[in-house]
Amino acid sequence: MAVANEATPATTVCPVARSTEVVGDRWTILVLRELYMGATRFEEIQIQTEATPQMLTSRLKALEADGMVERHPYSEKPLRHEYRLTDKGWAFYPVIYALRAFGEMWCKHGEEVATRFVHRKCGHDVGLATVCPHCGEPVARKDLDATLGERFAAERAARREAFRRR
């Protein structure tokens, strides 16, 4: 995956093409999803994305090189890092939110919503909107409480259990 940054000159002025150089594959999108869901450690991210260690390492290194995430040590012996989104990484969240809305609307057939978001300020479900339908206020991730649907929660728990049994 190519990373467009100050060291690598861009080959196009198209912002969509430049953005896909940073986040243009399934694995990177899933890594970012996990970071937005609060995962910070390699193992947590690997369990839920089901990426190989090599694949996850390369995506995290690319995101770090592009300034989307930062590594922070949480253990000295052995040296272990956690990954935190930067301001640039958080700026990508509306894209993930839009992918979620598209997937809920067009890629599922009568299934429950995977994640419900409730506006902290007024206590109402925002559905798939970026503006609270109850109070009319624009909402960002920091304004929302997330609750996993029963099936999505079970799927994530099953991945954790399968990983632990290996």
Image (tube, rainbow, N blue to C red):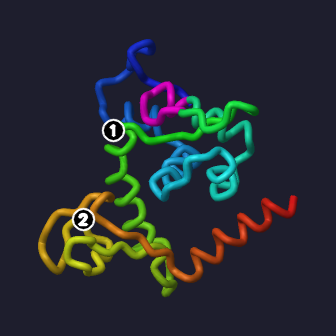
Q: Residues within 10 Å of mark 2 (few under 14, many from 20)?
A: some
**Mark 1 secondary-structure assignment:** helix
Up-down: is 6 above or below 54? above
Q: Residue furthest bottom?
A: 110
The residue at the point 64 percent across, 53 percent down is 44
Residue 131 horizontal side relative to residue 166, left or right: left
Query: x%, y% of residue 16?
Result: 34, 38
Which quadrant, please, contains the C terminus? Answer: bottom right
Which stretch is magenta? 62-71
| Residue found 35% across the figure and 23% down from its top | 12
Which residue shows up at 55% across the image and 53% down it?
39
In the image, residue 59 lies in the stretch drawn in magenta: no
Q: What amino acid is at disc 1? A: Asp
User: On residue 130, which mark appears?
Assistant: 2
x, y percent for residue 92:
36, 45
Q: Residue at x 54, y 40 (%)?
A: 83
- Amino acid bearing label 2: Thr
Q: Assign the N terminus to one quadrant of the image.
A: top right
Q: Which residue is mark 1?
A: 87
